[in-house]
Amino acid sequence: MHMVGAHHWGLVALSVLIAIAASFTALDLAGRVPQYSGRTRAGWLATAALVLGGGVWAMHFVAMLALHLGMVVSYDLPLTALSFAIAVLGTLVALTAASQPGRSPAGLVLSGVFMGLVIVGMHYTGMFAMRVPGTIVYDPLYAGAAVVLAIGASTSALWLAFRRSSLAERLGGSLAMGVGISGMHYVAMAGVTFTAGDAEAMAHVGGSMDNVHVVIAVSAASFAIFAAALLAAMYDRRFTLLAEREKALWREGEERFRTLYRRTPLPLHSLGPDGRIEQVSDRWLDLLGYRRAEVIGRPLTDFMTPESVRERDEDHWPRLVGTGELREAEYRLVARDGRLIDCILSAVAERDGQGGITKTLCGLIDVTDRRRAEEALRQAQKLEAVGQLTGGIAHDFNNLLAVVMGNLELVRKRAPNEPRLMTLIDNTLQAAQRGAALTQRMLAFARRQDLKPQPVDVPELVMGMAELLRRSIGPSVRIETRFPLGLPQARVDANQLELALLNLAVNARDAMTDGGMIVIGAREETVPAQADELEPGALRPGRYFCLSISDTGAGMDAVTLARAAEPFFTTKGVGKGTGLGLAMVHGLAAQSGGALILASEPGQGTIASIYLPIAEPSARGTALRGDTEPTPPVSIDQEAPAGSGTTRVLVVDDDPLVLSATSAMLEDLGFIVTEASSGKQALDLLDEGLSFDMVLTDQAMPGMTGVQLAAVIRQRRPSLPVVLGTGYAELPADAGASLTRLGKPFSREALRRAVLDATRPDNVVALSSRTG
């Protein structure tokens, strides 16, 4: 006879409350763990494990007492004790593993899985401790669901346990954890079937409240432990706060002392009432490189630039006379060897009885390196800002070009065969293609181009493009190559490196109007580790392949050199350059993990050095020689085969122009098209039961990106292929390598090929059916 148990809802609520309270207390205790080490850390871990594991066990025990079966139920004491030990010790192991410094997300998940299995083991050990006059049957489906809930709740608990969180976050987390843990129990119990045995063994047990003394004892003990643990955590938190305040006061005093020390002038000099130098320290002499006899008796202004002299006479000296002190006045001094030194000067005036200045005590602080670092940072920030702007413009421009090129191809197909009209259409289409190439250069500077770095034999690559270089440079410029033997291979995109080398060679040719020589060389260079923090854009320590291109041209002054790599900056005449050549090379080097370094002086030519990472020795066997050719584009005169007429494509794009143009090309190719202007609308169409063979979606859309839409579709319809159409090469880290990408702007043939590739039968992987 099958028995259907009933629960006492008061005890059910009590069990859930115990789980929530245990979760909150354990989270609060675990928050103390990262601050300690040794025995104290172990003590907090053990306490948290006792609270969480014991709380889960207490929840389970009270929940079992809440179950009324209408038969006599007893519990085996050793097995019940064993279930308690399993919960506490297993939780201790999981918390210890998850609290290790530097643990990876995979380690956190493994700890969560272990802890979830421990909770499940505790549950079923407690079930085995039940003694009933009959048999107990477990449904595997409910048991599996309980395992999933236990692992999910455990992983969430471990994730929340060792991160800083507010009280509201801990309350919300403990509520979710408590409901999840108790939900695991009741889901598992929903799959339990009790079959009564001998009828004489049946006895009406008046509900779980007959065990009121046991319930009170377990609940009281649990809440007492929770309260004691919370009090201990509150005391520790208070003690820690007092200690941190003491440390803060100590740090404040130390910082005040450091500030005073920092403002104390170390290169010292003193001036007489007429402003002439009377005494100098040895550090002052070392800083400027003079001998003592060369400075004593001379005015301080003799060692300043004209701008600093003017500022000192008009502003700083009157302020010193009026107030008696001068703080952090900025000057530029001239060293004996002609170096310019940026300094901060502080001064205090001594006065006689009549208030006249008798002596001025001054100190200098050398800030030359800091000024250079600030200038480098400003330049790097400017280039980064321009790069971001350029990348955004290129992306939007790609969308416009996609519309233009798509519509032009459709117009060309439908236009009458009139030669003049065909010529106009072809010229317009070629101009759009040139615009697409321009956006690729812009994306290269913005470091958003699609690179395929591989080991490359650079000398062989250069030799392979020698004929192309000669045709591009012309007969008036001689090209020499200087490659030593035994050079390592560089890790870079071979095609992009060829394009960069060609850009640099053309720039060098344009700088030599009367002819000259270009020298292409290479060397291996090691950048040593530095104690100081790296400047923005500086090379990281390591081994690099340095490819250099030097010319004998006019060279550049300092102002032009500083702006040479900026996009759209050019010294060529109107219509002779886009100003993106060096910007593209700069972006390629930076995106490859290296740098572009330019050196030039007027009349001395220019040296452009591309630093590239060296390929790992294990990958050298697959080095590219740079002679691989990209897949030739399909001619606009070549007719693309149409679709089957039954392939259904869902097109998603928030730009109505792009959406319309893409749909028109797909329909012209013979595909059945449905449009959606957002990810939400696309999901609504899928939820309505509409059937599609593939989805073509844009990436940058408000509300839901293309990658996010693909993730949702992968969950709901795993066999539905998704193609991501975007002008960006960099996608979010969670995009996945399996997501097919169609670069914008795309041609009619590229679109057809993408659809056919995505809908090929071998690209559709059917999920195996699951039963249970």
Image: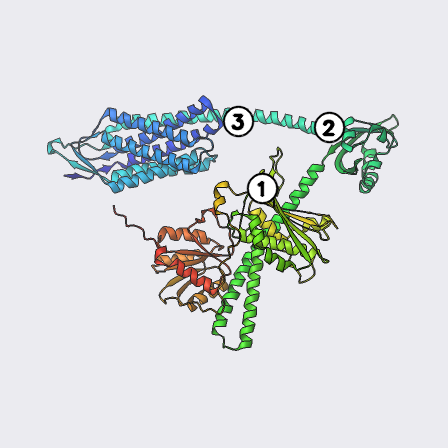
Which residue position holds label 2? 264
> Do the residues under discs 3 and 1 have CB atoms within 8 angstroms?
no
Q: Is residue 652 above or below residue 280?
A: below
Q: Which quadrant would the N terminus be assigned to in this image? A: top left
Q: Position of residue 197 (x, y in %)?
A: 13, 34
Disc on res. 544: 1
| Residue at disc 3, secondary structure | helix
Residue situated in front as seen by the camera: 107 or 130 = 107
Disc on res. 241: 3
Q: Residue at x 40, y 63 (%)?
A: 674
Q: Quadrant of residue 232?
A: top left
Amino acid type at circle 3 is Leu
**Residue 568 shows in this picture:** no
> Do the residues under discs 1 and 2 have CB atoms within 8 angstroms?
no
| Residue at disc 1, secondary structure | strand
**Residue 436 shows in this picture:** yes
Return the disc, 3 or 1, that comes first in the chain's sequence: 3
Residue situated in front as seen by the camera: 585 or 299 = 585
Crowd class of label 1 (few under 14; some 14 to 19; many from 20; radius 10 Å): many
Q: Closer to us: mark 3 or mark 2? A: 2
Marks 3/1: CA distance?
A: 49 Å
Q: Position of residue 593 (x, y in %)?
A: 56, 44
| Residue at disc 2, secondary structure | loop
Marks 3/2: CA distance?
A: 34 Å
Return the disc, 3 or 2, that comes first in the chain's sequence: 3
Amino acid type at circle 2 is Thr
